[in-house]
Image (spheres, rainbow, N blue to C red):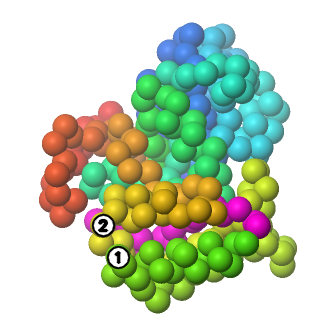
Amino acid sequence: MSISPADAAKRAAAALALESVEGGMRLGIGTGSTAVWLVRLLAERISATGLDVVCVPTSEATAALARELGVPLATLDELGALDLAIDGADEFDPRLDLIKGGGGAHFREKIVAAAAARFIVIADEGKRVPRLGAFPLPVEVVRFGWPATEAAIRRALEGLDLGGAPIRLRERDGAPALTDEGNYILDLALGAIPDAPALARRLDSITGVVEHGLFIGMADCVALGRADGTAGMLRRLAATPDPREIDLMRDEDA
Ligand SMILES: O=C(CO)[C@H](O)[C@H](O)COP(=O)(O)O
């Protein structure tokens, strides 16, 4: 089957991450077009080798695909903890901090990643940025009183040199988009986030915010797929004090 260069990169990233999967593992499986490759390749490996894994999906969409392809599923309530989570990202920076939530699943994705002993991100070169923020930051908010929550977010942004950034209520088919948890999403067009950990802490403190798409210090590595079908692993280095030091990442060809 011939696939596009974009899909070749996604597939290569997913395949590299899957090399870390061993029999007996409890796996978190992500959401999005890169995660679709992960689920497909995992299903192929299960059917070819009888690999014994059980997976917690991060969204109803991923659950449906996994069920269709025969990937064994469980809930996080049943398993309690996971050995490994693998998921896509919308952006990653030199510290391997992330923006996620382009698919609106970042709340469950963060719970799953936090419950896992290891978290591998699967991404292509287009997701690699020197500084997070070009991708609008998704913030899941409770529907009740959401304009008041939006106003609180605006005030928080002003205190972080991000005042006046456009905020848009995400829509689907002409109506506010609902997450799997029945909440709304506000997309914050920030351009460039001067201090992502500080913004994450500030958003964490706002009543009405369910979860934001900043994943700070959570990813252990990024399986980076390339359009030529190859992939390499970027690992978080032990000491990463300054996000401006671009050479914090080390490429290791698979
Ligand atoms: O965070 C996510 C969904 O909430 C996805 O991982 C993110 O949007 C990347 O998706 P894709 O692999 O399609 O680019």
Frontmost of labels 2 and 1 is: 1
Residue 32 placement, left or right of 223 = right
User: Label 1's element?
Assistant: loop
Q: Is residue 120 magenta?
A: no
* Earlier sequence position, callout 2 versus callout 1: 1
Compare residues 104 and 69 and report the one nearer the observer. Answer: 104
Question: Given contact means CB atoms under 8 Å apart, are the residues at marks 2 and 1 in contact?
Answer: yes
Q: Quadrant of residue 190?
A: bottom left
Residue range (magenta): 124-144
Residue 74 placement, left or right of 244 = right
Residue 97 in percent (x, y) is at: 36, 53
Residue that badge 2 annotates: 195
Compare residues 107 and 99 and report the one nearer the observer. Answer: 107
Please give the name of the residue rendered at 53% of the width and 74% of the height, measured from the top-left corner.
Answer: 153
User: Could you give the CA–CA distance between mark 2 and mark 1, rounded to whole angstroms?
Assistant: 8 Å
Residue 82 in percent (x, y) is at: 54, 23
Q: Does the closest atom of ligand 1 sit within 8 Å of the Cβ of label 1?
A: no
Q: Does the closest atom of ligand 1 sit within 8 Å of the Cβ of label 2?
A: no
Please give the name of the residue rendered at 28% of the width and 52% of the height, measured from the top-left corner.
Answer: 95
Residue that badge 1 annotates: 160
Q: Is residue 128 magenta?
A: yes
